[in-house]
Image (cartoon, helix red, strand yellow):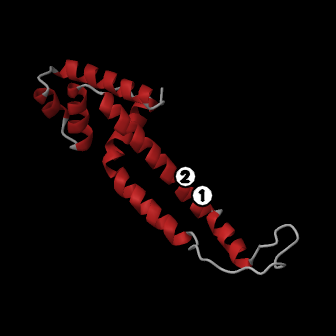
Amino acid sequence: MTRKPSYYRKTERLLYDYKTYGSAIRNLEAELEEILPKVSTSVVKLGEGTAASPFRSQTEDWAIKRIESPRAKRILRLLAEKKRWRQGIKEVRQQLTDEENTLVWMRYDLEKPHQEIWEALHMSRSTYFEFKNKLIKKIARYLGLL
């Protein structure tokens, strides 16, 4: 058996993970909320701070450090990535035919075995794998992986 191209493996991983993106995004947002400073209103007297920034405070410095921390940057990057892939997969699935959607749903959402899918689609084994390979390539192209 030959090794599948990287775009193929990446596309399949994204399709398998699609059903978890909602909870992953909520968890990342909750984690980000924990580390980002809470917004509060405070009164700043004129003349406080430095010449460059008359309204600078230790609290502001602390907040900036937290927002720019490696952990916050990592969470923000993961959050943007998950949202981007979720939206891309959602859009591509709307463009698929009923037969293509059935294959994606059975294989990647329900994780059914190949034989069960080709029987449900009334295909031979070889036709099913040709169809699946073309479908993965189509999805990868749409997602910008090709």
* Residue 19 in the image: above or below residue 121: below
Which residue is labeled 2 in the image?
A: 77
User: Going by the image, does 108 lie left or right of 123?
Assistant: right
In terms of secondary structure, where does tag 1 sit? helix
Looking at the image, residue 13 sits to the left or right of residue 145; the answer is: left
CA gap between label 2 and label 1 equals 6 Å
Find residue 142 and report its horizontal and vertical position in percent.
42, 28
Q: Count the marks: how many? A: 2
Name the residue that disc number 1 marks. 73
Residue 33: image tag: none
Residue positioned 37% across, 24% down in the render: 138
Residue 48 visible (yes or no): yes
Task: Answer with the quarter of the image where residue 123 lies.
Answer: top left
User: Which residue appears at 15% of the width and 20% of the height?
Assistant: 124
Residue contact between numbered discs 2 and 1, judged by CB atoms under 8 Å: yes
Amino acid type assigned to the residue bearing label 2 in the image: Arg
Q: Is residue 12 visible?
A: no
What residue appears at the point 62 percent right and 77 percent down from the top-left corner? 41
Position in image of residue 130 (x %, y %): 27, 19
**Above or below, 139 relative to 110:** above
Near mark 1 (Cα within 10 A), the count class, few <14, some 14-19 or many ≥20, is: some
Q: Position of residue 18 (x, y in %)?
A: 34, 45
